[in-house]
Structures are given as C-alpha cells and as structure tokens.
C-alpha cells in the first residue's frame, strides 16, 4: 500500500476511509504541501486521522459514499479507498455508485487507487475463509458476493482506464478519470 500511495497520490488528494491516517502519513507526495481532504462517515475516524496529519491542515468531510459527495467537481488529482468497499453493505451493483461519486471529484487524468477484500472468485485457504466468515458474522465485512469481475464491471462504468490485481483475497485497483 505504501508503494501504491507513493506512486499514485497527487498534490490535491482525497483520502476516503483514512483509518488512522497511517498511509497518508507515510506517503511521499509530489509536493511538501499537498492539499489533503479526509472523508469518512465516522467522525471519530476523521478526528484521529486529522490529528495525525495536522501538519497538512487537512480538510474534513463527513459523508456517506452512497450519496453524492459534498466536494468540488473535477478537483482532485487522486483519491484513495484503502480497505473500504468490503465494509459497505450490498453487492457491486449497489455499491458501484460509489465509484461514480468518486469519479466526479477527480480531474481528467486523476487517479483512484485502493484495495478491498473479496469474498468470491479468489483462492482462499482454510484460514482465510474462516477469517472472512468470522468478519461477516461480526458485521465487520459486508462483502458477500464481492468478486473481481464485479469490481472490474463497476470500474469500467465510470473510468476509461482501470487495472485490478489480485493478491490472495485482496483486490488492488487503480483507475484513471476521463
């Protein structure tokens, strides 16, 4: 992930589901003073990551990804969604709308990048399968039916160029806005 951030993050970066802010904190942006916006539904997550990234004076946006985003259109050079999709209920046909909303915030040539844990269509050993089922039981994962083909189908709807690489049960994706 650090390599993906370092190669993909732009000067105007939107971080969706920043968690603790670790990857943004470790990122080597193209400039020393990137314009950073953190987006999450959870205010505690935003407070934690904003505190860690205070040196950048990040803008904060508390929003639901399933609804149009209250952000400027065609503004960001990059957007990251690291380990976000598998926490959102619904299959790809439902949560694919998120890609539309994010694409609308990216300038032409802007890059979306991220990862998600898949539950279908990827090889899983017994331990991984047990872990995914346990996360479903706890309500932490909502990726029932999420597969590589569904992710690619949704990326193709909103981005003229995209790439999905599978590593175990994780999809690593990049997409370029038109």
Image (tube, helix red, strand yellow):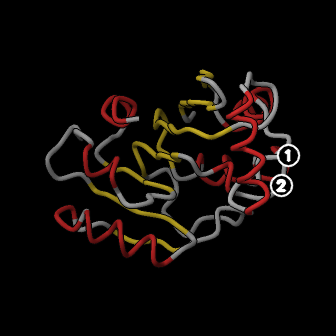
- How many neighbours does mark 2 have within 10 angstroms: few (below 14), some (14-19), or many (20 or more)? some
What is the x, y in percent for residue 44? 45, 77
Q: Is residue 60 above or below residue 150?
A: below
**Residue, disc 1:** 93
Residue 124 vs residue 10, the one in the foreground: 124
Query: Which residue corresponds to the image point at 36% horizontal and 37% vertical from the top-left?
Result: 5
Q: Is residue 131 above or below residue 138?
A: above
Instruction: Give SS at disc 2.
Output: loop
Query: Which residue corresponds to the image point at 48% horizontal and 78% vertical from the top-left?
Result: 43
Q: How many marks?
A: 2
Q: Is residue 79 above or below residue 17?
A: above
Q: Do we see residue 34 in this rendering?
A: yes
The dot on residue 90 is 2
Residue 143 vs residue 79, the one in the foreground: 143
Q: Are marks 2 and 1 in contact (CB under 8 Å)?
A: yes
Instruction: Give SS at disc 1.
Output: helix
Q: Quadrant of residue 89?
A: bottom right
In the picture, measured across the screen, residue 57 lies left or right of residue 108, that is left
Residue 165 vs residue 123, the one in the foreground: 123
What is the x, y in percent for residue 116? 62, 40
């Amino acid at each position: 992930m650090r390599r993906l951030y370092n190669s993909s993050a732009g000067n105007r970066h939107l971080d969706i589901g920043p968690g603790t802010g670790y990857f943004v904190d470790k990122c080597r942006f193209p400039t020393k003073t990137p314009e950073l916006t953190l987006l999450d539904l959870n205010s505690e997550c935003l407070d934690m990551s904003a505190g860690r990234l205070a040196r950048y004076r990040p803008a904060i946006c508390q929003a639901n990804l399933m609804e149009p985003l209250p952000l400027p259109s065609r503004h960001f050079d990059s957007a990251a969604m690291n380990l976000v999709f598998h926490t959102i209920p619904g299959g790809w046909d439902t949560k694919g709308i998120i890609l539309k909303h994010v694409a609308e915030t990216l300038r032409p040539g802007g890059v979306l990048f991220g990862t998600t844990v898949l539950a279908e269509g990827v090889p899983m050993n017994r331990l991984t399968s047990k872990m995914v089922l346990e996360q479903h039981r706890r309500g932490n994962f909502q990726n029932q039916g999420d597969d590589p083909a569904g992710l690619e189908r949704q990326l193709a709807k909103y981005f003229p160029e995209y790439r999905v690489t599978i590593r175990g049960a994780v999809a690593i994706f990049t997409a370029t806005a038109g």
